[in-house]
Image: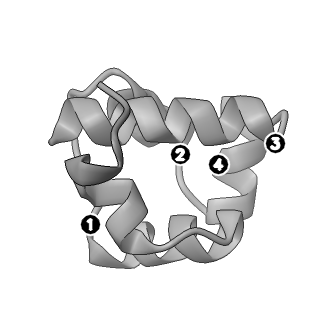
Amino acid sequence: MKTYFAKVLKELMTEHNFTIEELGIKLNASQSQINNWLNSKDYPGYWAIKDISDFFNVSADMLLDTKYCDE
């Protein structure tokens, strides 16, 4: 699931043209946290998932559920 989340987050960042630094500021998260999410080394907690889904206007299910994956 970490790999799926990383893929979705990368796609959202690309689609909205956000850098790691810009996303960190918007989400009040460190660049290292976001790097860990993007590299599937760590997984965001509940509140971060909520903040990410609110920020990108997507459901938490879309961020977490592989049934939305095109693979």
Residue found farthest to the left? 1
Nearer-N-terminus badge (4/2): 4
Nearer-N-terminus badge (2/1): 2
Residue 19 vs residue 66, the one in the foreground: 66
The kind of secondary structure element at disc 2 is: loop
Assess whether mark 2 and mark 4 are in contact (beta carbons under 8 angstroms). yes
Alpha carbon of mark 2 to alpha carbon of mark 3: how far? 19 Å
Please name the residue shown 40% across and 61% down the image.
62
Residue 69: assigned label: none
Q: Position of residue 4 (x, y in %)?
A: 28, 36
Q: Which residue is mark 2?
A: 30
Please name the residue shown 48% across and 73% down the image.
59
Alpha carbon of mark 4 to alpha carbon of mark 2: how far? 6 Å
Q: Classify residue 69 by image quadrant.
A: top left
Question: Disc 2 vs disc 3: which is toward the camera?
Answer: 3
Label 2 sits on what residue type? Ser
Question: Disc 2 vs disc 1: which is toward the camera?
Answer: 1
Please determine whether, in this image, residue 60 is positioned above or below residue 67.
Answer: below
Q: Which residue is mark 1?
A: 45
Q: Position of residue 12 (x, y in %)?
A: 64, 42
